[in-house]
Amino acid sequence: MIFSNTEFYYTPKEFISGNTIIIAEDEAKHIVKVMRHSINDEIFVTNGEGIVYRAIIENITKREIVAAVKEKFLLANKTENLTFCIPILKSADRFEFALEKSVELGITNFLIFNAKKSYKRGVKIERWERILLSAMKQSLQSFKPKIEFTNSLKTSLANKSNIIVFEQNAGVTLKSYLENKSKIEAITEKETYFIFGPEGGLTEEELNIKNGIKLKLTDNRLRAETAVITVGSFLSLVK
Amino acid sequence: MIFSNTEFYYTPKEFISGNTIIIAEDEAKHIVKVMRHSINDEIFVTNGEGIVYRAIIENITKREIVAAVKEKFLLANKTENLTFCIPILKSADRFEFALEKSVELGITNFLIFNAKKSYKRGVKIERWERILLSAMKQSLQSFKPKIEFTNSLKTSLANKSNIIVFEQNAGVTLKSYLENKSKIEAITEKETYFIFGPEGGLTEEELNIKNGIKLKLTDNRLRAETAVITVGSFLSLVK
């Protein structure tokens, strides 16, 4: 509540020592040049690991900002057990939109993969990390999203037991699956992986991943990025 | 199910007479030039009012396609009682994304308004209609979305009794509001208007619209378009 009209900034925990916060490089530039903050202004800074600091800017140099902590808030990550497995999409815009929206809705773990029918685009981890971090700050959250890439989702998930694969033609809907309360708890409390398909869909082999449950979202055909956002929305409302 | 690997095309009901369907202009061009259909191909055509026709192309001229109906399906509009009231956003991309996603998720009525804090952009009804129609076809739906613009939401909704306003600082969440089953039924069965805010938020006066109930979506701050998509997702899952 206290945050709703403010901005969050991020600095790694290594830059926070006692009551002193140092914000460096681009983030410092953004605070001074774009947001026009100056000495004695109050700012909110997160370490990306659940802590938010209310701090006062004490010094601004060319390279960094030094701020003094006035108050500390500890926030909870309600979705740390969940991972969204998203294929690289043909449209980079739509792919990045899916990432941004997922973070806004509270998802913090991403496993990006090349599906058989993905249009093999470049793996741009650094760019994706910037998008995720920006969405985290924008939505006033304090857990820095983690993103990894795998060339083989099958190998990466070989030892996982709780996997949900979204598939337009599945017989069971997410909604009916979750009418069983213990299933909701399993999804929201156990380590769970959600697999989405690319524009062209997943192959039979991909759909039949070991320990996977196939569920359908809606009767309408959803675009790849819409399926991701829909599940994110749903989780943000049930958690 | 039968539709999941196909394309939908649209032609107004005036162009359908008995078992003959005429598809004209851009849609006809798209079918021939982009989708490379030719005589004797099977296509699915909707009249935008809930009927889908399986038809065979019988003739192609420079101006139109003539197709013969083989089968007719009648689909239901599960959200005809719901209207999304969306303000013009600063970012046209994000605004159009909200429209596209809402349609994919099944919403068919839109009332666009200039909020006090909207960045008065142009009212592009024709462009928005194209986006909505395209999303309808893409997601294999058969109700042509309706979109209107109003300069005064207050006047447009003066006689409406079921209004939900989404507001970050509201005390009650959509989730807790809907734990009462009769409230879900009211939303899904009665004529209901959902009001979303622009980037800068709604004013006090806008928030306190007559007969409006203020609800909050999530603890995270959601971007304007994300709030729209989140409610669309939620409705697609509860209906």
Image (spheres, coloured by chain):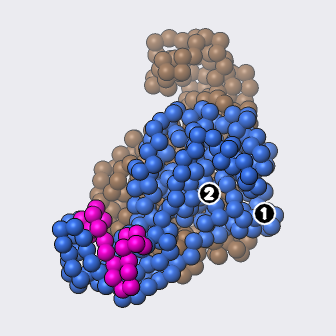
Chain colours: A brown, B blue
Name the residue type under label 1.
Answer: Lys
Task: Give the side of residue A232 with respect to residue B212, left or right.
Answer: left
Magenta span includes A147: no
Residue located beneath label 2 in the image: B83
**Residue marked by disc 1:** B183
Residue at left 65%, top 48%? B156
Q: Quadrant of the N terminus of chain A?
A: top right
Foreground of the two, B66 or A210: B66
Question: In this view of the protein, which residue sits in the foreground, B78 or A171?
Answer: B78
Kindly tell me whether residue A99 is visible in this rendering.
no
Please report, as a chain letter, where disc 1 is located: B
The picture places residue B160, in percent across and down from the top left corner, at: 73, 54
* N-terminal label among 1 and 2: 2
Q: What residue is at 57 percent from the left and 16 percent from the top?
A: A37
- Find numbered disc 1 in the image and state the secondary structure of the residue it sits on: helix
Task: Examine the rendered structure and indicate whether residue A127 appears above or below residue A83.
Answer: above
Please provide percent x and percent y for residue B45: 38, 75
Which subunit holds the residue at mark 2? Answer: B
Q: Which region shows up in magenta?
A: B11-31
Residue drawn at (26%, 81%), measured in percent from left and top?
B57
Query: Which class describes the residues within 10 Å of circle 1: few (<14), some (14-19), or many (20+)?
Result: few
